[in-house]
Image (cartoon, helix red, strand yellow):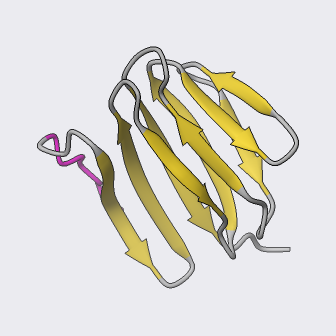
Amino acid sequence: MQILNPDLSVSQGPDRMLSKRHLSIVRLVLPKGFTIKRHRSLMTVTVVAIKGAIVFHTDDEATTLVPGQAVVMAPGEFHWLEAPAEAGEVMVVHGVLAE
């Protein structure tokens, strides 16, 4: 077992908690008004809201994630995030899923 602890000094952007070839876990801190630009991953991406209200965009839709909600995307799907009304945090897991 491995315990991962956040770097609480990170006040904006990524806190890379685990980085391996087929798995990464990142705590992403978004101050109010901050936007993560449009991008995609070659792995499956799971984003779990843990603080605040984060607007999560794909090319087809936008949804506001609140703590406890999650979104899962297929590899290659473009997406971006923003915190327009309040600061927020999400946990982002990039991984290769077993078939």
- Which region is colored magenta? 1-8
Q: Residue at x 66, y 58 (%)?
A: 45
Q: Is residue 77 left or right of residue 32?
A: right
User: To which quarter of the image does residue 16 belong?
Assistant: bottom left
**Image location of residue 65, percent across then percent down:** 63, 24
Query: Is the residue 76 above or below the residue 8 in the image?
Result: below
In the rendered view of the protein, which quadrant contains the C terminus?
bottom right
**Image location of residue 76, percent across then percent down:** 77, 69
In-front residue for pair 48/64: 64
Q: Is residue 24 left or right of residue 69?
A: left
**Image location of residue 83, percent across then percent down:** 47, 27
Query: Is the residue 46 above or below the residue 76 in the image?
Result: above
Q: Residue at x 58, y 23 (%)?
A: 68
Q: Residue at x 74, y 59 (%)?
A: 78
Q: Residue furthest toward the top?
A: 85
Most frequent secondary structure within the magenta stretch: loop
